[in-house]
Image (cartoon, rainbow, N blue to C red):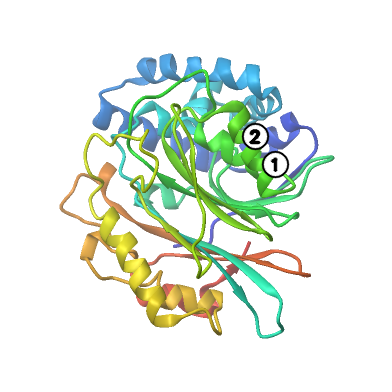
Amino acid sequence: MTTPPRISLSGTNYEIGYNHGSSLRVQIARQIESYYEMFQNSSKLDREGVHRRAREYEATILKLVPHLHQEIVGIAEGAGVDVLDIVALNVRSEIVLGEFQDGCTSISWKVVGEDGKSIQYLAQNWDWVRPVQQNLALVEIEQEGKPTIKMVTEAGIVGKIGYNSHSVGVLLNALRASPTDTSKLPIHVLLRLCLESRTASEALSQIEKYGAASAQHILLGDLSGAQCLELSPIRNHCIYPKDNNFLAHTNHPIENTAIKEPSEFPGSKERLGRTHEIVETIGPKNLSPHRLRETIFNDGKNGNFSICASENACKPKWIRIMTLFNIVICLKEGSEPTAEVVFYNDSAAWIDPKNVLLL
């Protein structure tokens, strides 16, 4: 694929949003078209039905995090679209909860480098439908009084997968479960609040303060370590690393009994088990982003349900899930945080070092 656009945003939240919208105007238009097709085919929701649901979440965003509502308004005006279309992009996980199957595999691994300093790796393959890949962007956001954010996001969405200048990083796995609660914040808005936080502890307090509108998993970490947050409108639950300082999560709840899946997420348990198998064989020594990519994240065992998943052409295009990109975030003691991103291209060449982008 072509390299995704890279944009740098700063100023007030409205200015950040407006420049986001104007810079990614073409991608946002494609995103809206793609998601409305998915909404219609997966949940029989037309544009009016989507707007009805989006309107409820917009009121919550305006009430709880007005600065991000201003950003959403700015994105809409910069892109020349209805603000409810941008709200719909930001709450797409909540609008059709349980219908989408965006399967992702996330890990954290805290190790000691050759220089004796600790390194916290946060890494994942992000799996979703091919049409969205052309609408991804590498985004940097500078806000007064807050850490600088670097993330990979979908055009029009205010928060997603990445890290900030205070060495706080976040990853995302979708979970499929009821209920939803429109009085709480959508997952992509919560991810943005995490990325605005100075520590993982501060990010967690933000999540607890506002609550998650749907069941989702965030892998949250900083230099002190990482934790899996299995979120639900009913009750949140944290999973901490065991003795090997390793965590992994896919697309099913592991410990949060408040999350009740309507059906098992295909391949999720197999991917989780496979991740632990690989970790046992490679060990923590001489770990690097490239080694993680070529071992865990390039693994093709279990076919279309593998950690590195190819598109299943037999399925309708709006549910043909495949790996779109890999990200490895490196939070190192005494160093600036960094991240490497590689976009999937249907061949093993995607893990070649020359295809790596620095976020």
Dot 1 crowding, Cα within 10 Å, few <14, some 14–19, many 20+: some
Q: Amino acid at mark 2?
A: Gln
Q: Quadrant of residue 340?
A: bottom right
Q: Residue at x 71, y 84 (%)?
A: 115
Front one among 200 and 323: 200
Q: Looking at this rendering, what residue extends furthest in the right direction?
A: 145
On screen, 163 above or below 142? Answer: below
Rendered image: mark on residue 202? 1
Q: Amino acid at mark 1?
A: Glu
Q: Is residue 186 visible?
A: yes
Percent of width and height locating residue 84: 51, 21
Q: Is residue 338 left or right of residue 314?
A: right
Q: Residue at x 36, y 45 (%)?
A: 253
Q: Are marks 1 and 2 in contact (CB under 8 Å)?
A: yes
Percent of width and height locating residue 75: 62, 31
The residue singled out by tag 2 in the image is 206
